[in-house]
Image (cartoon, helix red, strand yellow):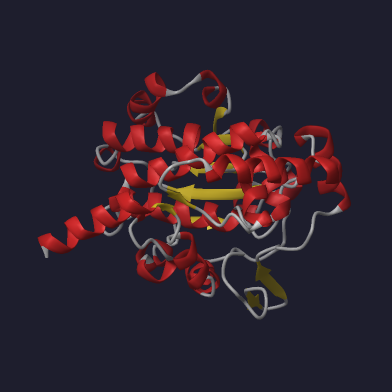
Amino acid sequence: MLSDVEELPSVQLGDYVLRFELEDLTPFGKEVAQNELRETPETRVAAIEELRSLLKEVEGLVVPLDNDDWMIRFLRPCKFYAKSACELIKRYYQFKIKHWDMYNELMPSKEANIFKQNILAVFPNRDQLGRRVLLLELGKNWKHKEVTLDEVFKGCVLFLEAAMLEPETQVHGAVVIFDMDGLTLQQAWQFTPPFAKRIVDWLQDAVPLRIKGIHIINQPKIFNMVFALFKPILREKLRNRIIFHGTDRDSLYKHISKECLPAAYGGTVDAPRVQGEQWYELLLKCDNEYKEINNYGYAQQIEELRNKKNKKK
């Protein structure tokens, strides 16, 4: 982590402890890292040093050059090719500048509403391949007049920034489930071309995490209108990872094991459903980490944007 913590953040839920997994890789994680990401002790050392040298040459970019763990966050999704990792880092921070209104002082303490709405959650367990599972319920449970899609986006960013801290997630990646049950025409109108472009650009170019699959479930026919905004700007790699299941649970189980899903989706996981406010309580304990994350990037451009905002006040 970039901030100092005395103990790993966790929240007690009955007999279950909700926490971030910041320990070293498991044996399974190490095996996947070596086989899929070319990760060995020797590769790590060489890639970190090369990436550090490359980043020193990037004009105006302020990053924690002395933090090896931070560098590994970007090297793993790039299979330890330092040049690719350097380009990813630049795109990551360029995206933050382009969408500064979304990222300015972004931290859990300022985004309570999205968590209180309880439409965004991460499963407490991983799937059969060790991946984190992010759930978004943007149908009947989404009160679109109380929480905007921009807030949903910010919540996703906060969750994925947290996931980036976990070595096991850096290796195995994440999958996303969109539960669109009950989507209405009024809700569908909330999706705009600029929003669609921001999401697609983010997923394709600026997320330093392996997004292994996007699963659309319970979608009504009106969802076709929403997806039509996204489809033309999807590149083949991401388009092939978007899978439509409708109400066909057997189709979903081919990708996420039944033993890794909660009862609401026909699964057998007996861990409690983690409510949005419980996730919020956990993320709040990492508020200082998000403050540190916000300290890095293209410093001069950030300062100019902040000054511009202050003049408008």
Q: Position of residue 180 (x, y in %)?
A: 44, 41
Determine whether, in the image, residue 97 is placed left or right of residue 119: left
Q: Quadrant of the N terminus?
A: bottom right
Residue at 69% x, 37% y is: 253
Q: Is residue 227 above or below residue 113?
A: above
Task: Decide if residue 204 is in sight here.
Answer: yes
**Residue 75, quarter of the rendered image:** top right
Determine whether, in the image, residue 90 is placed left or right of residue 273: left
Q: Is residue 110 above or below residue 206?
A: below
Q: Position of residue 224 (x, y in %)?
A: 38, 26
Determine whether, in the image, residue 155 is placed left or right of residue 173: left
**Residue 98, quarter of the rendered image:** top left
Q: Number of marks in the image?
A: 0
Task: Decide if residue 276 is in sight here.
Answer: no
Q: Position of residue 251 (x, y in %)?
A: 65, 30
Determine whether, in the image, residue 256 is placed left or right of residue 65: right
| Front residue of this view, candidates 195 and 114 | 195
- Furthest residue toward bottom: 6
- Furthest residue toward left: 312
Residue at 46% x, 37% y is: 91
Residue at 24% x, 42% y is: 186
Q: Position of residue 221 (x, y in %)?
A: 38, 28
| Front residue of this view, candidates 56 and 176 | 56
**Residue 54, quarter of the rendered image:** top right
Q: Quadrant of the C terminus?
A: bottom left
| Front residue of this view, candidates 265 and 40 | 40
Q: Is residue 90 above or below residue 312?
A: above
Residue at 48% x, 65% y is: 292
